[in-house]
Image (cartoon, helix red, strand yellow):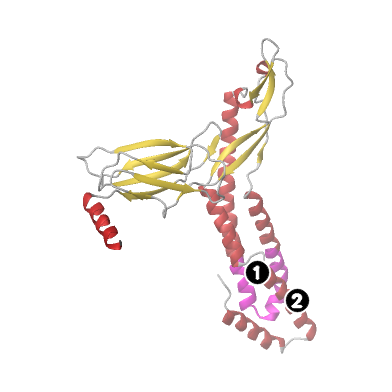
Amino acid sequence: MAMTLNEAEGGSERAARSAEQLGTADWDSYLEKRNIVLQFLHSNLSLRHLQHHQNKVELLKKSCFYLEVEPKHVNVRDQNHVTLRTDILQLVDPCQFQRMKKVAKDQTETQLMLSTELLEQLKSGREELNNYVRNYDIKTFLSQWNLIMQKLTQLSTFLENLLSLQTPGKLYVKHHLVSHANLRGTRLPNIRLSICTKMPLIFDRNESYAHKHWAKLKWFTENQESHLEQCELHIKLLTNGSQNEPGYSRIQPVTSDTCAVSGLQPGRSYEFAIRRSNTHTFVYGKWYDRFVLTTKTDADEHADGNACALEE
Protein backbone atom coordinates (compact mmCIF):
# COMPACT_ATOMS: atom_id res chain seq x y z
CA MET A 1 0.00 0.00 0.00
CA ALA A 2 2.87 2.37 0.73
CA MET A 3 4.53 4.40 -2.02
CA THR A 4 8.24 3.57 -1.91
CA LEU A 5 11.05 6.04 -2.60
CA ASN A 6 11.98 4.27 -5.83
CA GLU A 7 8.37 4.37 -7.03
CA ALA A 8 8.12 8.09 -6.29
CA GLU A 9 11.41 8.74 -8.06
CA GLY A 10 10.26 6.63 -10.99
CA GLY A 11 7.10 8.74 -11.28
CA SER A 12 9.18 11.92 -11.15
CA GLU A 13 11.53 10.67 -13.88
CA ARG A 14 8.60 9.84 -16.15
CA ALA A 15 7.14 13.27 -15.45
CA ALA A 16 10.46 14.94 -16.25
CA ARG A 17 10.68 13.18 -19.62
CA SER A 18 7.09 14.19 -20.41
CA ALA A 19 7.80 17.77 -19.34
CA GLU A 20 10.34 18.13 -22.15
CA GLN A 21 7.48 17.79 -24.62
CA LEU A 22 5.14 20.29 -22.88
CA GLY A 23 5.10 24.00 -22.24
CA THR A 24 5.81 25.69 -18.92
CA ALA A 25 2.09 26.30 -18.21
CA ASP A 26 1.24 22.59 -18.48
CA TRP A 27 4.22 21.66 -16.34
CA ASP A 28 3.24 24.13 -13.61
CA SER A 29 -0.36 22.93 -13.75
CA TYR A 30 0.78 19.32 -13.44
CA LEU A 31 2.99 20.05 -10.43
CA GLU A 32 0.19 21.92 -8.66
CA LYS A 33 -2.37 19.18 -9.24
CA ARG A 34 0.05 16.37 -8.42
CA ASN A 35 0.90 18.06 -5.11
CA ILE A 36 -2.81 18.21 -4.24
CA VAL A 37 -3.05 14.44 -4.62
CA LEU A 38 0.20 13.82 -2.72
CA GLN A 39 -0.87 16.07 0.15
CA PHE A 40 -4.14 14.16 0.46
CA LEU A 41 -2.28 10.83 0.42
CA HIS A 42 0.22 11.96 3.05
CA SER A 43 -2.35 13.52 5.41
CA ASN A 44 -5.99 12.39 5.38
CA LEU A 45 -5.27 9.10 3.67
CA SER A 46 -1.85 8.30 5.11
CA LEU A 47 -1.08 4.77 6.22
CA ARG A 48 -0.93 5.96 9.83
CA HIS A 49 -4.41 7.46 9.62
CA LEU A 50 -5.84 4.39 7.92
CA GLN A 51 -4.32 2.14 10.57
CA HIS A 52 -5.85 4.34 13.27
CA HIS A 53 -9.30 3.98 11.69
CA GLN A 54 -8.73 0.24 11.25
CA ASN A 55 -7.94 -0.13 14.96
CA LYS A 56 -10.98 1.96 15.87
CA VAL A 57 -13.34 -0.15 13.76
CA GLU A 58 -11.89 -3.40 15.14
CA LEU A 59 -12.32 -2.09 18.70
CA LEU A 60 -15.95 -1.15 18.03
CA LYS A 61 -16.64 -4.63 16.66
CA LYS A 62 -15.45 -6.04 20.00
CA SER A 63 -17.41 -3.54 22.11
CA CYS A 64 -20.80 -3.83 23.77
CA PHE A 65 -23.64 -1.44 23.00
CA TYR A 66 -26.37 -0.35 25.37
CA LEU A 67 -29.51 1.74 25.18
CA GLU A 68 -29.21 4.89 27.26
CA VAL A 69 -32.36 6.64 28.47
CA GLU A 70 -32.43 10.27 29.54
CA PRO A 71 -33.55 11.45 32.02
CA LYS A 72 -32.63 8.50 34.20
CA HIS A 73 -35.08 9.52 36.94
CA VAL A 74 -38.40 11.36 37.07
CA ASN A 75 -40.48 12.69 39.97
CA VAL A 76 -43.83 10.87 40.24
CA ARG A 77 -46.64 11.32 42.78
CA ASP A 78 -47.91 8.21 44.52
CA GLN A 79 -51.50 7.50 45.57
CA ASN A 80 -51.03 9.75 48.60
CA HIS A 81 -49.77 12.58 46.35
CA VAL A 82 -46.27 12.23 47.76
CA THR A 83 -43.59 12.98 45.17
CA LEU A 84 -41.11 10.13 44.72
CA ARG A 85 -37.92 10.05 42.67
CA THR A 86 -38.40 7.03 40.37
CA ASP A 87 -36.13 5.22 37.93
CA ILE A 88 -37.41 5.95 34.43
CA LEU A 89 -37.01 2.28 33.44
CA GLN A 90 -39.66 1.36 36.02
CA LEU A 91 -42.17 3.49 34.11
CA VAL A 92 -41.25 2.53 30.55
CA ASP A 93 -43.66 0.30 28.64
CA PRO A 94 -41.83 -3.07 28.27
CA CYS A 95 -43.12 -3.80 24.76
CA GLN A 96 -42.19 -0.36 23.43
CA PHE A 97 -38.79 -0.60 25.08
CA GLN A 98 -38.11 -3.96 23.41
CA ARG A 99 -39.03 -2.43 20.05
CA MET A 100 -36.57 0.40 20.60
CA LYS A 101 -33.85 -2.09 21.58
CA LYS A 102 -34.48 -3.90 18.29
CA VAL A 103 -34.15 -0.60 16.41
CA ALA A 104 -30.91 0.15 18.29
CA LYS A 105 -29.51 -3.31 17.49
CA ASP A 106 -30.29 -2.92 13.79
CA GLN A 107 -28.73 0.55 13.77
CA THR A 108 -25.58 -0.69 15.51
CA GLU A 109 -25.13 -3.63 13.12
CA THR A 110 -25.65 -1.35 10.13
CA GLN A 111 -23.08 1.18 11.40
CA LEU A 112 -20.48 -1.52 11.99
CA MET A 113 -21.06 -3.00 8.54
CA LEU A 114 -20.86 0.41 6.85
CA SER A 115 -17.68 1.27 8.78
CA THR A 116 -16.00 -1.86 7.45
CA GLU A 117 -17.12 -1.14 3.89
CA LEU A 118 -16.00 2.50 4.03
CA LEU A 119 -12.60 1.50 5.36
CA GLU A 120 -12.13 -0.91 2.44
CA GLN A 121 -13.19 1.85 0.01
CA LEU A 122 -10.58 4.19 1.51
CA LYS A 123 -7.84 1.56 1.20
CA SER A 124 -8.65 0.80 -2.44
CA GLY A 125 -9.03 4.55 -3.15
CA ARG A 126 -5.54 5.16 -1.79
CA GLU A 127 -4.15 2.55 -4.16
CA GLU A 128 -5.98 4.18 -7.05
CA LEU A 129 -4.58 7.64 -6.26
CA ASN A 130 -1.10 6.19 -5.90
CA ASN A 131 -1.47 4.67 -9.34
CA TYR A 132 -2.36 8.07 -10.83
CA VAL A 133 0.78 9.62 -9.34
CA ARG A 134 3.16 6.76 -10.11
CA ASN A 135 2.09 5.59 -13.55
CA TYR A 136 0.36 8.46 -15.39
CA ASP A 137 2.48 10.66 -17.61
CA ILE A 138 1.80 14.41 -17.51
CA LYS A 139 -0.53 14.47 -20.51
CA THR A 140 -2.64 11.58 -19.22
CA PHE A 141 -2.65 12.96 -15.68
CA LEU A 142 -3.94 16.37 -16.81
CA SER A 143 -6.53 14.84 -19.14
CA GLN A 144 -7.89 12.73 -16.27
CA TRP A 145 -7.85 15.54 -13.69
CA ASN A 146 -11.65 15.84 -13.45
CA LEU A 147 -11.87 12.12 -12.74
CA ILE A 148 -9.10 12.40 -10.14
CA MET A 149 -10.87 15.34 -8.44
CA GLN A 150 -14.10 13.33 -8.31
CA LYS A 151 -12.18 10.53 -6.61
CA LEU A 152 -10.66 12.95 -4.08
CA THR A 153 -14.10 14.36 -3.27
CA GLN A 154 -15.60 10.88 -2.96
CA LEU A 155 -12.84 9.70 -0.62
CA SER A 156 -13.19 12.85 1.52
CA THR A 157 -16.91 12.07 1.87
CA PHE A 158 -16.15 8.44 2.77
CA LEU A 159 -13.73 9.63 5.45
CA GLU A 160 -16.28 12.04 6.95
CA ASN A 161 -18.93 9.29 7.00
CA LEU A 162 -16.51 6.87 8.66
CA LEU A 163 -15.77 9.38 11.41
CA SER A 164 -19.48 10.00 12.01
CA LEU A 165 -20.18 6.25 12.25
CA GLN A 166 -17.58 5.81 14.98
CA THR A 167 -19.85 7.71 17.37
CA PRO A 168 -23.10 5.93 18.30
CA GLY A 169 -26.14 7.93 17.27
CA LYS A 170 -29.37 8.98 18.88
CA LEU A 171 -32.66 7.17 18.33
CA TYR A 172 -35.90 8.77 17.28
CA VAL A 173 -38.71 7.91 19.72
CA LYS A 174 -41.76 7.43 17.55
CA HIS A 175 -44.13 6.21 20.25
CA HIS A 176 -44.62 7.06 23.92
CA LEU A 177 -42.40 4.89 26.06
CA VAL A 178 -44.13 5.89 29.28
CA SER A 179 -47.85 5.48 29.87
CA HIS A 180 -49.71 8.51 31.22
CA ALA A 181 -51.37 6.16 33.70
CA ASN A 182 -47.98 5.41 35.30
CA LEU A 183 -47.32 9.11 35.79
CA ARG A 184 -50.46 9.75 37.85
CA GLY A 185 -50.91 13.24 36.52
CA THR A 186 -47.21 14.12 36.46
CA ARG A 187 -46.07 15.92 33.33
CA LEU A 188 -44.64 13.54 30.73
CA PRO A 189 -40.84 14.00 30.55
CA ASN A 190 -39.01 14.55 27.27
CA ILE A 191 -37.41 11.14 26.91
CA ARG A 192 -34.24 10.88 24.83
CA LEU A 193 -32.72 7.60 23.69
CA SER A 194 -29.18 7.03 22.46
CA ILE A 195 -26.73 4.18 22.01
CA CYS A 196 -23.71 4.14 24.29
CA THR A 197 -20.56 2.09 23.78
CA LYS A 198 -18.61 0.18 26.40
CA MET A 199 -15.12 -1.02 25.57
CA PRO A 200 -14.39 -4.78 25.55
CA LEU A 201 -12.97 -6.51 28.59
CA ILE A 202 -9.55 -8.02 27.79
CA PHE A 203 -7.59 -10.48 29.92
CA ASP A 204 -4.21 -9.34 31.16
CA ARG A 205 -2.29 -12.44 30.14
CA ASN A 206 0.83 -11.34 32.02
CA GLU A 207 -1.04 -11.02 35.31
CA SER A 208 -3.27 -14.09 34.94
CA TYR A 209 -1.92 -17.48 36.04
CA ALA A 210 -2.90 -20.87 37.44
CA HIS A 211 -1.70 -22.93 40.39
CA LYS A 212 -2.63 -26.48 41.34
CA HIS A 213 -6.19 -25.94 42.57
CA TRP A 214 -6.87 -22.32 41.74
CA ALA A 215 -6.26 -19.57 39.22
CA LYS A 216 -6.07 -15.80 39.33
CA LEU A 217 -7.58 -13.80 36.45
CA LYS A 218 -7.11 -10.11 35.74
CA TRP A 219 -8.66 -8.02 32.94
CA PHE A 220 -8.82 -4.43 31.74
CA THR A 221 -10.41 -2.13 29.16
CA GLU A 222 -8.70 0.03 26.56
CA ASN A 223 -9.87 3.23 28.26
CA GLN A 224 -9.07 1.96 31.80
CA GLU A 225 -12.58 2.48 33.24
CA SER A 226 -12.56 3.79 36.77
CA HIS A 227 -16.16 2.71 37.47
CA LEU A 228 -16.28 -1.09 37.61
CA GLU A 229 -19.55 -2.71 36.54
CA GLN A 230 -20.73 -6.25 37.05
CA CYS A 231 -19.42 -8.75 34.54
CA GLU A 232 -19.44 -12.51 34.12
CA LEU A 233 -16.44 -14.82 34.30
CA HIS A 234 -17.12 -18.09 32.46
CA ILE A 235 -15.07 -21.13 33.50
CA LYS A 236 -15.02 -24.29 31.36
CA LEU A 237 -13.06 -27.52 31.85
CA LEU A 238 -11.63 -28.72 28.53
CA THR A 239 -12.13 -32.45 27.98
CA ASN A 240 -10.51 -32.83 24.52
CA GLY A 241 -13.76 -34.24 23.19
CA SER A 242 -13.69 -37.28 25.48
CA GLN A 243 -17.02 -39.11 25.66
CA ASN A 244 -16.12 -40.71 28.98
CA GLU A 245 -15.72 -37.44 30.89
CA PRO A 246 -18.63 -35.10 31.60
CA GLY A 247 -18.17 -31.46 30.70
CA TYR A 248 -17.90 -28.86 33.44
CA SER A 249 -18.59 -25.15 33.32
CA ARG A 250 -19.84 -22.39 35.55
CA ILE A 251 -20.43 -18.65 35.54
CA GLN A 252 -19.08 -16.44 38.30
CA PRO A 253 -20.50 -12.89 38.67
CA VAL A 254 -17.75 -10.36 39.39
CA THR A 255 -17.71 -6.62 40.17
CA SER A 256 -13.99 -5.94 39.94
CA ASP A 257 -11.10 -6.34 37.50
CA THR A 258 -9.63 -9.44 39.21
CA CYS A 259 -10.96 -12.78 40.38
CA ALA A 260 -9.53 -15.84 42.10
CA VAL A 261 -11.13 -19.09 40.94
CA SER A 262 -10.88 -22.05 43.33
CA GLY A 263 -11.94 -25.70 43.16
CA LEU A 264 -9.92 -26.53 40.04
CA GLN A 265 -8.40 -29.92 39.27
CA PRO A 266 -4.59 -30.22 39.03
CA GLY A 267 -3.00 -30.75 35.64
CA ARG A 268 -6.12 -29.76 33.69
CA SER A 269 -6.79 -27.09 31.09
CA TYR A 270 -9.56 -24.55 31.66
CA GLU A 271 -10.96 -22.00 29.25
CA PHE A 272 -11.79 -18.65 30.85
CA ALA A 273 -14.01 -16.07 29.19
CA ILE A 274 -14.88 -12.57 30.44
CA ARG A 275 -17.89 -10.63 29.22
CA ARG A 276 -20.10 -7.79 30.36
CA SER A 277 -23.38 -8.71 32.02
CA ASN A 278 -26.45 -8.86 29.81
CA THR A 279 -28.41 -6.07 31.52
CA HIS A 280 -31.89 -4.75 30.75
CA THR A 281 -30.47 -2.10 28.41
CA PHE A 282 -28.06 -4.40 26.52
CA VAL A 283 -28.42 -4.01 22.74
CA TYR A 284 -25.55 -5.70 20.92
CA GLY A 285 -22.21 -7.38 21.55
CA LYS A 286 -20.93 -10.67 20.15
CA TRP A 287 -17.20 -10.66 20.90
CA TYR A 288 -15.67 -11.60 24.22
CA ASP A 289 -12.12 -12.40 25.25
CA ARG A 290 -11.15 -15.92 26.27
CA PHE A 291 -7.99 -17.89 26.83
CA VAL A 292 -6.80 -21.17 28.33
CA LEU A 293 -4.79 -21.81 31.49
CA THR A 294 -3.49 -25.18 32.65
CA THR A 295 -3.31 -25.89 36.37
CA LYS A 296 -0.10 -27.24 37.83
CA THR A 297 0.56 -30.83 38.89
CA ASP A 298 2.45 -32.07 41.95
CA ALA A 299 5.55 -32.42 39.77
CA ASP A 300 5.21 -28.81 38.57
CA GLU A 301 4.96 -27.47 42.11
CA HIS A 302 7.90 -29.65 43.22
CA ALA A 303 9.98 -28.28 40.33
CA ASP A 304 8.97 -24.71 41.21
CA GLY A 305 10.00 -25.31 44.82
CA ASN A 306 13.43 -26.63 43.79
CA ALA A 307 13.92 -23.63 41.48
CA CYS A 308 13.15 -21.23 44.32
CA ALA A 309 15.56 -23.06 46.61
CA LEU A 310 18.34 -22.80 44.03
CA GLU A 311 17.78 -19.08 43.63
CA GLU A 312 18.09 -18.58 47.38
Q: Is residue 265 left or right of residue 204?
A: left
Instruction: Residue at 61% x, 80% y: name it.
Output: 8
Question: Would you place residue 289 above or below residue 179 in this image?
Answer: below
Q: Is residue 146 magenta?
A: yes
Coordinates of residue 292 in the picture (x, y in percent): 35, 49
Question: Would you place residue 252 above or below residue 45 in this image?
Answer: above
Number of other residues with Cα within 10 Å of mark 2, as a class: few under 14, some 14 to 19, many 20 or more:
few
Q: Is residue 14 left or right of residue 307?
A: right
Q: Is residue 62 magenta?
A: no
Number of other residues with Cα within 10 Å of mark 1, as a class: few under 14, some 14 to 19, many 20 or more:
many
Mark seen at residue 32: 2
Coordinates of residue 147 in the picture (x, y in percent): 69, 67
Instruction: Residue at 69% x, 76% y: name it.
Output: 141
Screen quadrant of the C terminus: bottom left
Magenta residues, start to end = 126-152
Task: Give the SS element for disc 1.
Answer: helix
Q: Is residue 307 left or right of residue 118?
A: left
Helix, strand or loop: magenta stretch: helix
Disc 2 marks which amino acid?
Glu
Instruction: Residue at 68% x, 10% y: name it.
Output: 80
Task: Give the SS element for disc 2.
Answer: helix
